[in-house]
Image: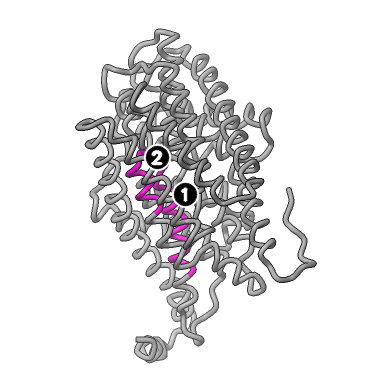
Amino acid sequence: MRKFLKRSFDRIRNEKLKQNLLQAIPFWVASLITGLIAVFYSRIFAFFEGITFSIIHAHSWHIFILTPVCFLTAWWVIKRFAPYGGGSGIPQVMAAIELANPRDDKKVTKLLGIKVFFGKIISSFLMILGGGLIGKEGPTIQIAGTVFRKINEWLPSWWPKISKRNMIMTGAAAGLAAAFNTPLGGIVFAVEELTKTHISYFKTALFTAVIIAGLTAQGLLGPYLYLGYPDVTNLSSFIFFPLILVAIVSGLLGSSMSRIILSILRWKRSFKFGYYHVLYVLSVAIIIASIAFFIDPRILGSGKEIMTTTLFTADKHTHWYTAFDRILGTILSFTTGAAGGIFAPSLGAGAGVGSVISGWLEVSANNENLLILGGMVGFLTGVTRTPFTSAILVLEMTDRHNVIFHLMIAGLVASMVSMLVDKHSLYDHLKVHWMHDLYHEDEEPNKPPVTK
């Protein structure tokens, strides 16, 4: 195949055209593969989530067996086979982008390698089957980053050199676009979160990769919306005041949740014996199972059910403890060390916060929908500190362009109040965590750990 490609390109006399094609093809191929993987990963993820709720509805007490077994196995898979595949995956991609140079190539392999690829998939499937409050977007981004990096590695020696950093960044954007069917969100995410390089250096590759990955997903799944079309017409003129309140509360809660997650992870790093981790994972599983069994089973899973229920049914009001339990469950699930994203659980928690506050204020159904969407944007911004990515993601999930300015205001307000809790996002802190572990394993004793 490589010889055939070389002969084919040698026939092209226009050198500029040949160079442009050689630069673009790896991005096209990797994007197509990413789109295919994202579709099948998403379908299996949803399938296992559906199995969980089916089991609970049929025999609710089974959760006390299912959750501990799945959580413990998911943690063991990461611990045994892919120690750098735990958690969301986005901080690992951020660290890989920063380390994308020949000197640190072995470190990047630990973050975006074949073992991580399969370990991430298996562990996240087990977590969602056990009712874990996780999402698919973070794992999809790390998987996509791995695909793009491997395509870059497999290029023959005669192929023009392509920036590893740009390949990984583009893969992450394509992964998010394919996971949620949000192409603009993928582009904004790359600009706002992943890169400090001027976008003009790789804008064509980024745009085409997002388009190809998104079109591949749409070709197999159809032009779907992640959520649907909530009714946000005939909004009150004074809705901005409740929206700002929702943004403040959700932003503070999202950033506070991040601080708690980081504190628990630091505490877990002090564990001297392996069985301490086993006990922690089992304890987490029992707590989540108990909340689902005795209080509300809707706290389980990615959070999509609570979003769709509050936005598209008459049952718009959730109890305050449901929103609290969603946040608690996300904290516990994420700190097990197994694989799982935090985007979707954050959106679900934000929907719960918006629902609770809108119930207290007794606004109309359309205004309630806007406050729920604002809570989703605000909570995700509190976790990620990416207000425009959060607003664009929710916009593309619902196709409600008439409230784009409302969502951006919610994101900006949440971003500002989150600074009161912590100046850095959860991903920034976790990126430092992963880089510290990589340098700690390095054989060079004089290599200083990365600090923030």
Where is residue 3 shown, x and y percent of the image?
38, 91
Callout 1 amino acid: Ala
Q: Residues within 10 Å of mark 2 (few under 14, many from 20)?
A: many
Please name the predominant secondary structure of the magenta segment in the image: helix
Viewport quadrant of the N terminus: bottom left
Give the camera-side residue of 377 and 272.
Answer: 272
Q: Which residue is disc 2 drawn over? A: 132
| 393 versus 364 height, above or below | below
Write the start and end of the magenta stretch as one range: 123-149
Chosen colour scheme: one colour
Q: Is residue 432 magenta?
A: no
Q: Which mark is residue 376?
A: none
Which of disc 1 and disc 2 is earlier in sequence? 2
Answer whether labels 2 and 1 touch (C-beta < 8 Å).
Answer: yes
Q: Quadrant of residue 228?
A: top left
Where is residue 40 shown, x and y percent of the image?
29, 56
The residue that appears at 53% across and 25% down in the rendered structure is: 250
Left-right relation of 231 to 110: left
Q: Is residue 208 visible?
A: no
Q: Is residue 68 visible?
A: yes
Callout 2 amino acid: Gly
Q: Residues within 10 Å of mark 1 (few under 14, many from 20)?
A: many
The residue that appears at 51% across and 48% down in the rendered structure is: 337
Q: Which residue is disc 1 drawn over? A: 338
The residue that appears at 33% across and 20% down in the rendered structure is: 233
Where is residue 134 shown, x and y percent of the image?
42, 41
The residue that appears at 39% across and 41% down in the rendered structure is: 68
Give the camera-side residue of 246 and 335.
Answer: 335
